[in-house]
Image (tube, helix red, strand yellow):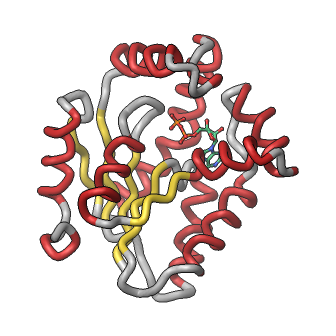
């Protein structure tokens, strides 16, 4: 199994790059945000909770996010290549993720951080909201709140991987294909063939 985390603030392009890794190299793309949006569409109990929280730019509780991840990992085998997008999002999810992986003799193989300036992020999110796909992108106060949460709750996750190794930072403000090329250059050749 190969475990890659693509990280970065809202709008940094995590899901775009993870989708490319899926299409071109067969990575299994796990987006906790996408799983939650599907639950919202389905109108499940989790979906109803997620709708309230996501609409306000807040996170779902850590235990819920971790359970979603346990469910997905259990359904794959040891040749699977995973790209996680939007998880772990808090230090507590990060510690729990390490425990989950430890218990199966697995580890995070690479953590790639997409670096993009705040100004560009806001422009991208507002542009994405114009397509009407995501309510949490259309309100500037919700966007600002998500940035705050990113800085307060998610940056500690980045610091964790900086100090535990396998950390890479790449410029996420370049063209999509350039960013993708740079990501691929950070991955072991046997994962991108
Ligand atoms: P973005 O990175 O642009 O915020 P995502 O699709 O990753 O978009 O996430 C959308 C929303 O889903 C988040 O703002 C949060 O409310 C919720 N969410 C996604 N992943 C998690 C997680 N691991 N823990 C808690 N909440 C999450």
- 161 in relation to 53, above or below: below
- 90 in relation to 98, above or below: above
- 190 in relation to 61, above or below: below
Looking at the rendering, in which quadrant would you find the C terminus? bottom left
Front residue of 167 and 19: 19
Q: Residue 141 falls in which quadrant of the image? A: top right
Q: Is 44 positioned to the left or the right of 82 in the image?
A: right
- Residue 80 rendering spot, x and y as whole percentages: 39, 78
- Residue 6 rendering spot, x and y as whole percentages: 37, 51
> What residue appears at the point 63 percent right and 52 percent down from the top-left corner?
35
- Residue 149 rendering spot, x and y as whole percentages: 59, 32
> What residue appears at the point 59 percent right and 80 percent down from the top-left corner?
74
Front residue of 114 and 160: 114
Q: Residue 184 falls in which quadrant of the image? A: bottom left
- Residue 64 rendering spot, x and y as whole percentages: 74, 58
Looking at the rendering, in which quadrant would you find the N terminus? bottom left
**Residue at the right extreme of this rendering:** 45
Front residue of 175 and 118: 175
> What residue appears at the point 36 percent right and 63 percent down from the top-left corner?
4
> What residue appears at the point 66 percent right and 43 percent down from the top-left corner?
37
- 126 in relation to 181, above or below: above
Front residue of 70 and 127: 127
Q: Is 80 positioned to the left or the right of 23 in the image?
A: right
């Amino acid at each position: 199994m190969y475990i890659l985390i693509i990280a970065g603030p809202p709008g940094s392009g995590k899901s775009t790059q993870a989708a490319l890794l899926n299409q071109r190299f067969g990575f299994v793309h796990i987006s906790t945000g996408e799983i939650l949006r599907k639950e919202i569409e389905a109108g499940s109990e989790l979906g109803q909770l997620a709708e309230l929280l996501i609409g306000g730019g807040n996170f779902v509780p850590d235990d819920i996010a971790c359970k979603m991840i346990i469910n997905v990992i259990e359904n794959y085998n040891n040749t699977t290549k995973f790209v996680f997008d939007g998880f772990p999002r808090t230090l507590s999810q990060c510690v729990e993720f390490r425990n989950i992986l430890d218990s199966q003799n697995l580890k995070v193989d690479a953590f790639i951080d997409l670096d993009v300036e705040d100004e560009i992020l806001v422009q991208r999110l507002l542009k994405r909201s114009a397509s009407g796909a995501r309510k949490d992108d259309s309100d500037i106060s919700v966007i600002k709140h998500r940035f705050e949460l990113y800085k307060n709750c998610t940056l500690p996750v980045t610091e964790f991987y900086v100090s535990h190794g396998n950390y890479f930072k790449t410029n996420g403000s370049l063209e999509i294909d350039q960013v993708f090329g740079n990501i691929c250059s950070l991955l072991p050749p046997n994962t991108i063939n």
